[in-house]
Image (cartoon, helix red, strand yellow):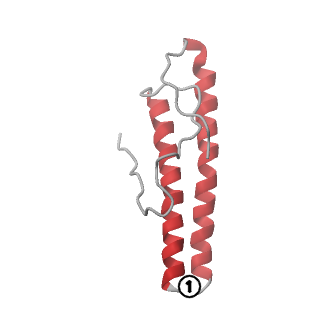
Amino acid sequence: MHAQLLSHEPQPESSLGNVTAAVSRGLHDMAQPLTMLSGLLELALLRQQTASELRMTVEVSLDQAGRAIAILNSVRELVSGQAPAKSVSNLAEGAAQPGSGKVQACQPR
């Protein structure tokens, strides 16, 4: 997991580069759970699975979707100016606990 949270400290006007870099890192971080999700779903289609194996695949997929949603929500907050930040690391923390089957929904704008 990532180690830094969004910082709510005011930023100087020249921080556009910092915001751009933070958004870039957030989008890059989103690639890992999406790639894993895609791979899990492809494998599920390619081979026969027991009900238990399929359930595990779905649970892990939900966890990965939750990570991606949390990152997306944090990047959206950063871009909309709701949460000025120096970093968008650790965006997936708290989105979904492994095996919980619960995913945090994307916040509408």
Q: Image point 45% across, 34% down: which residue? A: 77
Q: Is residue 27 above or below residue 78?
A: below
Note whether 57 is above or below 71 in the view shown: below
Q: Secondary structure at mark 1?
A: loop
Measured along the vertical axis of the image, is residue 15 above or below residue 89? above
Q: Most extreme residue toward the left, as rendered? A: 108
At horizontal 61% and vertical 29% (from top left) the residue drawn is: 20
The residue that appears at 54% across and 58% down in the rendered structure is 64
Q: How far from the left and from the top, in percent, is residue 68?
A: 53, 51
Q: Which residue is mark 1?
A: 49
Image quadrant of residue 40? bottom right
Q: Quadrant of the C terminus?
A: top left
- The residue shown at (45%, 28%) is 83
- Percent from the top left, x then y, of residue 34? 58, 57
Q: Looking at the picture, how far across and down is residue 95, in whole percent?
A: 46, 49
Q: Amino acid at mark 1?
A: Gln
Q: Nearer the viewer, residue 56 or 43?
A: 56
Q: Is residue 94 above or below residue 46?
A: above
Give x and y (percent) for residue 44: 57, 77
